[in-house]
Image (spheres, rainbow, N blue to C red):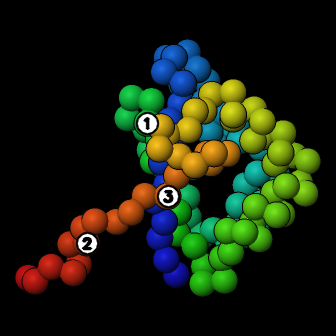
Amino acid sequence: MSCQCLALDLRDDPAAIAEYERWHRSEFIWPAVVRSIRAAGILDMRIFRTGNRLVMLIRVAPEFDAGAKAKADAANERVQAWEALMATFQQPLPWAQAGQKWTPMHQIFDLAACPP
């Protein structure tokens, strides 16, 4: 099991940010999206926000394959509709590669690795 951290920006618009957060409440998120996340081997996912910056932490099963998830999502009409809706609120980080939404973050500190 491993953890991954990714970042993304939202459009800097308070109304859009509030709407994005509303879509991510458990009563509004689409069940097909949740099923696709779980089916891919993502065991836990949390998204945090400060200003218009988002940070997503995911804990994945050993068999998790990001490429396989991307392929499955591309074939899932409901997930594609969700992604299109979310894209109306999102903007890539300035250093993101072309077509990249969520940008992986590089871990630079681990308290567990420090001496007691």
Name the residue type under label 3.
Pro
Q: Circles 3 and 2: CB distance less than 8 Å? A: no
Q: How crowded is mark 2: few (under 14 residues within 10 Å), some or many (20 or more)?
A: few
**Residue receiving disc 3:** 104
Q: Distance between the residues labelled 3 and 2?
A: 17 Å
Q: How far apart are marks 1 and 3 (CA)?
A: 14 Å
Q: Quadrant of the C terminus?
A: bottom left
Which badge, 1 or 2, is on the more N-terminal residue?
1
Q: Where is residue 46 in the image (x, y as percent from the top left)?
A: 51, 53
Name the residue type under label 1.
Arg
Q: Residue at x 47, y 37 (%)?
A: 94
Name the residue type under label 2.
Asp
Q: Where is residue 2 in the image (x, y as percent from the top left)?
A: 49, 77
Q: Residue at x 58, y 33 (%)?
A: 91
Which badge, 1 or 3, is on the more N-terminal residue?
1
**Residue receiving disc 1:** 53
